[in-house]
Amino acid sequence: MQKVILLILIFLSQVIFSAPKITETEKLASTCKVWGFLKYYHPEVAGGKVNWDDQLLEKLPKIEKAQTKEEFSLILENWIDELGPVKEIAPITVSKDVKYFDKNFDLSWFNDKLFSKRLSKKLKFIEENRFQTTEEFGPDFDGFKNHKNYFDLNYDAKDSRILMLFTYWNVIEYFFPYKYKMNQNWNKTLEESLPSISIAKNMDEFLLAMKKMSTQLNDGHVMFHIYPSLSLPSPAKHYFPATGKIIDEKLVVTEILGDSLADAYDIKIGNVITKINDKSIKDYIEESRSLVSASNEASYLNKVVNPILTSYSENVKVEFLKDGKYETKQMVWFNYHDSHRNEFKKGAQKKKDKFKLLDNNIGYVDMGVIKQRNIPNMIASLKETKAIVFDMRNYPQNTWKEISDFINPEEKKFAIYTYPYLNYPGKYEWKEGVKAGFDNKNNYKGKVVVLVNEDSFSQSEWTAMSFQTAGNTTIIGSQTAGTDGNVFEFDFQGFHTGFSGIGVYYPDGRETQRIGIIPDIEIKPTIKGIQEGKDEVLDRALLFIETGK
């Protein structure tokens, strides 16, 4: 009998010790999803009746000690039970006017391999009897109304870092309209980010991990501004006295920012930079991908120019290519003010024309400088032209309505939206959108040409969409930034961040995010054209106006 008992005990001990242990990343990733789900779905939590952040901080030590999925799952089950019963209200009716957009919605993780059947069932019940609200956003849908700003957390504490990560991940999970457009699944980003957040030794390491996480949104609206007073001291930045564009993995100077410094080193528009401190431009491009957020490659190459031309050392070696030969210059770069002194010198920059008449009775409008008050004069001056070129290779003022009224013969819808559906977080609903123009028999009868490129960003893309309704509009240039919509912004300890808040689509449902405004005629600047002082995009537009092709 004793032998039988001994064998049973040995068997039970083997079963216990052979139970698969779960990793910290697995536990934290699953906890993040449950915590965020309850934050927006559970009536007690979403209704603001409990301090949900403090509860997470209290539970994390217990979660850390859990060794098996049974132990882990039980902690989460008990946590839900402690919140009290959820009133059964299912089925929740949805207005016939609501048309769901479901590409971002995913609660399939309810069946996580770490969860017991009881836990999965509890989560599903809460989904079906979820909190009902319309109070998460401000009146203009311009940001989070009730979102807490995390200024009081200590980045030295691991649990506080995890809380900030959980908060950010879940905001994106439920309120980023383009989650489905990311290169990498957001769940995978969570799993990859957790280890570096957990072991961060100081604030700079933590902020770097969070910044890398934000770039995974593949969204040009993403910002990640670190508060200097809270970051560890860093060396002063020094800048090249010009800026440029990346063409064929080379950096071509397109604008002089500090004239006297540029003269000292014979830097001119059209100069071709191939290396900086013995590192090729191609290497800089690849190394910066985890730190620069952009919606597409064209926008990324535009954004990466500034960090390439920024150095923490004032002594910089720059290699140029001229007439097939390489030339290296040992340069001294200066602070922002000295390297961008053209911005600070009165009269140093030629004042740009808001609009003007080109040869052959063609009008030209610089959308980056023209303002609403200038529109009546622009219309009076250019209404009899045979064509108007609207240069949108910039960020326009809010003039889309007045100009679209001028060029449109009738009112037409040019964009529709997806908004977060607050009564079912993670789901979105289609909204009616906006119209351009009105019934106008005196509308502009000539050709409308819109110039775009990677500098055409957000408001510029939106404005181009409104101009396309005119029927006589031709888009000329190259891929735009692919970043449309408004921006949601919020704060954490040490940094301010934001992302696109609503989805923007053409009336037929075509996407704009990451795609941008597709040119009817594609043309890009060349190194040779820049060196010869040509505006090849404008030249192509003028050719089209004269020939129709």
Image (tube, rainbow, N blue to C red):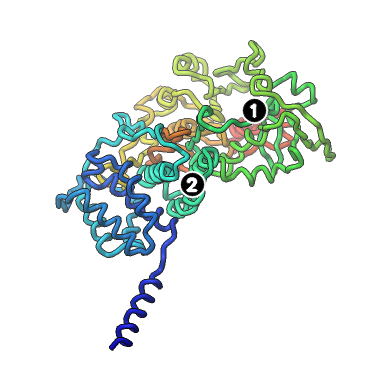
Mark nearer the N terminus (2 vs 1): 2
Q: Quadrant of residue 257?
A: top right
Residue 481's spot in the image, x, y percent?
53, 38
Residue 348, visible in the rendered structure: yes
Horizontal arrangement in the rendering, residue 260 relative to residue 134 (left or right) = right
Q: Which residue is mark 1?
A: 236
Mark 2 and mark 1: Cα distance apart in space: 26 Å
Residue 171's spot in the image, x, y percent?
37, 42
- Depth check: give the residue in front, 2 or 367: 2
Q: Is residue 88 above or below residue 405?
A: below
Q: Which residue is mark 2?
A: 197
| Residue at the image point whose x is 46% and y is 31% from the top | 459
Residue 528's spot in the image, x, y percent?
74, 35
Task: Tell me which amino acid carries mark 2.
Answer: Ile
- Depth check: give the residue in front, 292 or 147: 147
Q: Quadrant of residue 242?
A: top right
Q: Quadrant of residue 243?
A: top right
